[in-house]
Amino acid sequence: MISLKDLIRNDLPGNFNEAYNLYKRKELVLCNLNGIIVPPYEVLIHPSSYCNLTCQWCIGEHIHVESSDDMEPHFIPKKNEHILPNILHDESALLAVVENILSYKKTVKTVIDGIQIDKVFSVENFSFSGITGEPLIAKKSLISAIRKITSEGKRTGMFTNGLKISSDCCDVLSRLSYINISVDAGSNSTYNKLKCSGRKSQNSDLDKVFSNIYLLNQFKTLNATSLDINCSCILYPENYREIYTLASKLKELGVSNLRLKKDIYGEKVLNEIERKECLELIERIKCDLEDTSFKLIIVHDLNNKKEQLQDFSSCLISKMMAAVGSDGMLYPCNYHPRPNGYTLGNLVENSLEDIWESQFRANIDKQLPCICPSVCDPFKTRSNRLFDRLENEYKTNGPKLIHEFLHESETIFGGKLK
């Protein structure tokens, strides 16, 4: 008998786990397995393709651009064909995108394999992030969008490098559900080398990030919000020895989770000696620092070199999550926004419902994952691997396995949802 636990990362909690959608959103999964189109549960929005850092693992070579209008100094790739235009820097454009997402609601009343579904589906989660860009470069439009979304009671989060966090936006940011700050170093010198190309003007940028985390936590306390302040670190040969120091500092600052990742492009990975040393430091962090207020999340399994293999035949997760580029176009996922990429439609001018339920999107969907980039984020890869197994079993032997997995997910994640 196949067990769900045998197919997933059992060390990952809740939202980080690929099986969580079976527990939290079983109706959504069942609809998608049976060809019923419903809104995605999450939309990721890239407000800007510009950034204020030049991380070694990022896309493109960079040049400095001075401040203009509402934007602070930032960097753009020398080869501008690598980045998208910044339509969403305009406040009205980003708010139009948000409205066109919020308006999509769909009622489904049916019975699938003995399971009653009577639900109004809509986008539950919004996440602001970027592939080449820092969301807070477009601070004015971003803050307006966050205000609108949170007023609708939607779960909202942001991925940022943290340098543009300031007192003028902390009141709004403290009302997010979560924020993930990419720190990636435990010392100013390493941070400067990995993320600032060694520029002397940014010698103390890590200290600025720590100060901004402290400031944000003050606003969280002042406003009595439930914001999860999370941080992440991409493991490089230059920084892995600093993860214990980093974890200690972040816990002191009130951070909830530290997420450890590896370079998905595989350009700078730890060798065997470095990997073993890193695993020892991870165990020290778990032993010395983890408690109910601070957790270490190992996003990539350092013992599994095949974890990132895209060994699945379809991309069911793209039916549940979508992405908007800084050009205001809807994309199959957050790894697709790029010039001449596969777009699904203009979300500034059209409703998500019209784009999502179009034949054009259905035609693009049939080509996934064959037209996808060579890398994908670990959650989507693991999710697709699990859903692939379910789809194949579903077609061959009917719904028995999915019923078993739905029941097992309740055991894994803490009981039946009401």
Image (cartoon, rainbow, N blue to C red):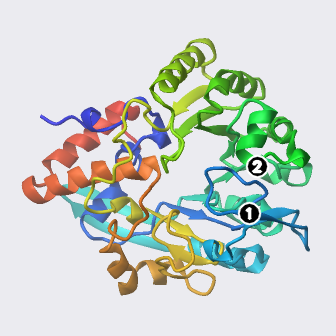
Q: In the figure, is residue 243 to the left or right of 355?
A: right
Above or below, comparing residue 381 to residue 233 in the picture: below
Q: Which percent across, then down, holds residue 109? A: 32, 67
Q: In the figure, is residue 33 to the left or right of 108?
A: left
Per the image, the residue denoted by label 1 is 62
Q: Amino acid at mark 2?
A: Ser
Nearer-the-camera pick, 305 or 318: 305
User: How far apart in space, not on screen, are marks 1 and 2 (Cα)?
Assistant: 10 Å
Mark 2 or mark 1, which is nearer the start of the sequence? 1
Q: Are marks 1 and 2 in contact (CB under 8 Å)?
A: yes
Q: Is residue 103 visible?
A: no
Nearer-the-camera pick, 157 or 284: 284
Per the image, the residue denoted by label 2 is 197
Q: Which percent across, then down, holds residue 139? A: 81, 63
**Quadrant assignment, res 254:** top right
Q: Quadrant of the C terminus?
A: top left
Above or below, comparing residue 363 to residue 123 in the picture: below
Q: Quadrant of the N terminus?
A: top left
- Which residue is at 45% across, 33% downward? 12
